[in-house]
Image: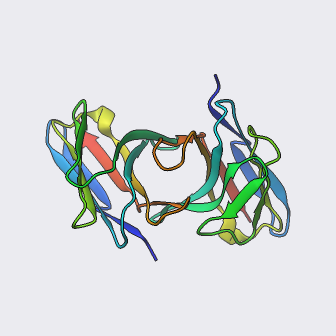
Amino acid sequence: SQELEQSPQSLIVQEGKNLTINCTSSKTLYGLYWYKQKYGEGLIFLMMLQKGGEEKSHEKITAKLDEKKQQSSLHITASQPSHAGIYLCGALLKAGNQFYFGTGTSLTVIP
Amino acid sequence: NAGVTQTPKFQVLKTGQSMTLQCAQDMNHEYMSWYRQDPGMGLRLIHYSVGAGITDQGEVPNGYNVSRSTTEDFPLRLLSAAPSQTSVYFCASSDRWSVDEQYFGPGTRLTVT
């Protein structure tokens, strides 16, 4: 079973377009993390959200947490080829030390 | 400061062979973990450790052993490799599990034939 579901699974966009990736949890979230993975490499931390309604931005990437819906969204504005990669959400789903990752969203940006 | 290092980068094993994937970090992090990444499955937690001498099972622990004798090292042992263990393995560490981001190694691509 997959505790964190991401959608879409893959995304191909033209450079300059905006896009949104969603992450939905089947359980209570104790912190939601977004990571980016370049193909064939390890993961790089993007940002962390802890409180319902929290919104964080870094350069052209914005993430929001909707605690009631157990959902987070990652929005990229004016996408660039450098945004290409796999985006994964991760979370602690119960009190304790087990961390779960979503299924991942593969993003391709066409110049 | 090398961060999190993993060796080897690539490995091919035959069914039934055993091997150890190495992971080391030089950030004095207490928490270390091992994940496997399979297509369409995201990353799944195999084992984790909250400090030297303490380890616990994650989501998919069967077929793997770990130990944590020092803060720096967290090796993952495959006891008897099976084709289902073909995957990319990532080691990660963090300072405080619940609030700080995890730092990931570059991964080990393992193929079991």
In x, y percent, where is residue B112? 73, 63
> In which quadrant will I find the C terminus of chain B?
bottom right
Which residue sits at x=59%, y=58%?
B36
Is residue A64 found left or right of B86 in the rendered image?
left
Answer with the quarter of the image where residue A84 lies: top left
Number of numbered labels in the structure image = 0
Relative vertical location of residue A95 with respect to residue A51 in this rendering, above or below: below
Relative vertical location of residue A74 with respect to residue A95 in this rendering, above or below: above
Answer with the quarter of the image where residue A3 lies: bottom left
Answer with the quarter of the image where residue B80 lies: bottom right
Figure coloring: rainbow
In x, y percent, where is residue A88? 39, 52
> In which quadrant will I find the N terminus of chain B?
top right
In x, y percent, where is residue B82? 74, 70
Q: Nearer the viewer, residue B8 or B113?
A: B8
Is residue B69 found left or right of B72 in the rendered image?
right
Which residue sits at x=43%, y=72%?
A2
In x, y percent, where is residue A14? 18, 42
Is residue B103 found left or right of A4 in the rendered image?
right
Residue lying at the far bottom of the rendered structure: A1
Q: Nearer the viewer, residue B5 or A111?
A: B5
Which residue sits at x=26%, y=56%?
A72
Residue lying at the far top of the rendered structure: B1
